[in-house]
Amino acid sequence: MTSLIGSYECKVDAKGRLALPMGIRKQLEGFSHEGFVLKRSVFQPCLELYPMQEWQAVMKEISQLNRFKKKNNEFIRRFTAGVKPVELDNSGRIQIAKDLIQFANIDKNVVVSSSINIIEIWDKDKYEAEVSSDEDDFALLAEEVMGNFENDEKLS
């Protein structure tokens, strides 16, 4: 799968249905027939939507963990807590379960944002607060994460 691109403001209706933006749906056309997995994010108060192909790749890695180690079982349990299979309906909507809406504190306005090979679904206010953090902090983070590549490992 190629990288997904875009961030979009959307609304979740009173029944918990979210119409995926056309820009995202077009990028997922070849994958939507397989369905998706919706789950809690590990690090942020948002949801992650995995195309089934991406979810299977993650599960393949996780299945390599030794289940006779307690911490591995705890990780698997917490990583998969609240996981739901979802499909696009005829109107291009997914149904977000109530427990996931509560986890992400989703009210009505959301941001659907690409994150390489998955889609993040955020409450709009929480997303704005997350991405508008201090620019100096982001510059330091970028340098720490991306600044350690050697010349032969250049990104651009």
Image (cartoon, rainbow, N blue to C red):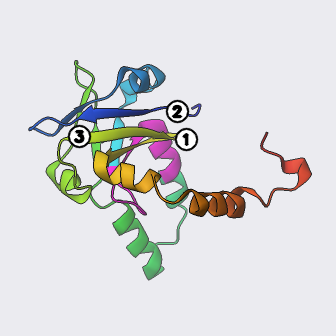
Q: Nearer the observer, disc 1 or disc 3?
A: 3
Q: Are marks 3 and 2 in contact (CB under 8 Å)?
A: no
Mark earlier in primary sequence (3, 2): 2
Left or right: where 66 falls relative to 106: right
Q: Is residue 31 magenta?
A: no
Circle 1 sits on which residue?
116
79 relative to 6 in the view: left or right: left
The region drawn magenta spans 39-58
- Residue underneath mark 2: 4
Q: Residues within 10 Å of mark 3 (few under 14, many from 20)?
A: some
In the rendered image, residue 54, in percent from the top left (x then y), is placed at 49, 41
Q: Residue at x 72, y 56 (%)?
A: 146
How far, Cα to Cα, is label 1 from label 3?
22 Å
In the image, is residue 90 above or below residue 130? Answer: above
Return the x and y of residue 144 as percentages of the image width and height: 70, 64
* Direction from residue 90 to residue 120 in the image, left or right: right
For label 2, the crowd category at 10 Å Cα-Cα, with few meaning under 14, some 14 to 19 and many 20 or more, is some
Amino acid type at image mark 1: Ile
Q: Are marks 1 and 2 in contact (CB under 8 Å)?
A: yes
**Residue denoted by label 3:** 109
Residue 68: % across, % down: 47, 78
